[in-house]
Image (cartoon, rainbow, N blue to C red):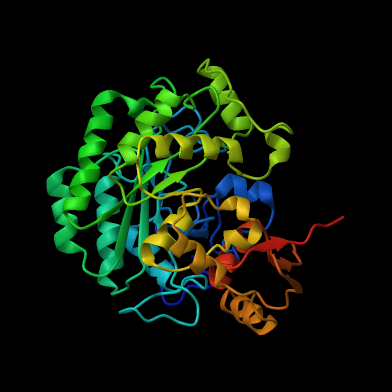
Amino acid sequence: MLGKIPGFSGHMASPNNPSNSTRLNLTLAVPNALPGKQEFAETVVGHYPVFSAKSWLSLNWFRVCNQGCGYCYRPGRGSESAHSPEKIYDEKFVADYLMDHPYFVPQYNGKTSSFPPSVIGLHTSSTEAFAPEVKDSTFRMLQLLDQKGINNPVAIVTKLFLKKEEIEYLRQNLHNISLYIMICYSAMPQEIEPMSDPETVENKARFMQALKDSGFTPVHYFRPIAFGWNDSPDRIGRALAFGSGSSAIVVGGITLSDDEFRQLDQLEIPLPGGPPEGWAKYGYRRKWFPKEAEETVIGLKDAAHIDTPLFRRASCSISYLRGMPDYNGYRFETKDNCTRSCPLVQVARCESIKPPTPERVKEALDKMQISGRSFEITPSGVIVEPEEMQFHILDTFELRHLLGFPVYLKKVV
């Protein structure tokens, strides 16, 4: 008999939700985002139905992406050999699992608990939300979440597009959640990113306009920008022109590891420029995008008289659009996280945040069902004592979201 999933009330695993998966045994997993070892996190991230990503609580019920981006980590994760998206969890199971998850903060009719409402991301670490094999399931998940009556923001990052009738379907059937569709276009060479072909780009531009016309809030996801691939003034200019009609632009760099190095080598694509210390030492899944690259993009944006605000972080764009301080507290981490394109009203919101009290941190850890952690509060962040299988890098993301303040793991020497 399949056991009950920790942290989940009233629902049992089913054949569509394999608790005895060799990839991830949900019956053994703690109710936190993922078990503690980083190599484990790198292996199964995107296969756990709900886990903490940097910008949101990510729901992932498919695995594998077949869009063919040369730099993407999703097709080659671990021992996967499939080339088409594979459904590994039922939509209702995942939606119900979210509602009972200790990290989730629901919002009903503008009211929440004492913590900020959770931002939900769909397929953000597993597949393409609007791929033909996935799109119907994505629509079902949106409706399931909406039918629960929550007003939480829901983010979808896509390199594809929807037709007008599909947008109209969403408009007529979504009444509660706030949907933010982040449309990717970075003028990447087509041999690196196949969806950069002119016809797809034109369809995505129409998609963005149709979203606005229907009352949705499209964001231009100008990522990744990689040195030697798409950082020329011409390519940056094309991408900025694409995003000029959006509500916000999010820029960022690229992150690479051994799997991506092998993939790029097989595709005979030269490596982009990277951090001076090398990718391995730069940090776990960190995207390299130095300040001078950001200034180049903003300079070209200003020269083109594009007044759309530009941000370095997805959480910054969603926070701005919702009229709230950045729930990741990036400005306290370092002001270099903030672009000079950020509206002054948003800067003021973020600077209004105060460091949390010890009682507030304990309240957040109790909400996460992680008690007994020792921590230190500094002016620039909360430093938490790590413990194997109890608190790790992905948990820091969630604690950030609850506190609206930076959180770090204490370095073990």
Q: Position of residue 180 (x, y in %)?
A: 33, 56
**Which residue corresponds to the image point at 41% horizontal and 38% vertical from the top-left?**
301
**Which residue corresponds to the image point at 31% horizontal and 24% vertical from the top-left?**
197
**Which residue corresponds to the image point at 52% horizontal and 52% vertical from the top-left?**
21
Total numbered badges shown on the rendered structure: 0
Residue 384 image-quadrant placement = bottom right
Instruction: Depth check: give the residue in front, 51 or 117.
Output: 117
Residue 228 vs residue 185: left or right? right
Figure check: 64 above or below 47: above
Instruction: Depth check: give the residue in front, 39 or 289.
Output: 289
Q: Quadrant of the C terminus?
A: bottom right
Figure check: 131 above or below 380: above
Residue 96 vs residue 339: left or right? left
Confirm whether residue 188 shows in the render: no
Q: Position of residue 340 (x, y in %)?
A: 51, 50
Q: Position of residue 307 (x, y in %)?
A: 35, 47
Q: Residue furthest top?
A: 268
**Which residue corresponds to the image point at 73% horizontal and 66% vertical from the top-left?**
383
Residue 350 vs residue 410: left or right? left
Confirm whether residue 220 shows in the render: yes
Q: Position of residue 281 (x, y in %)?
A: 73, 39
Figure check: 90 above or below 145: above
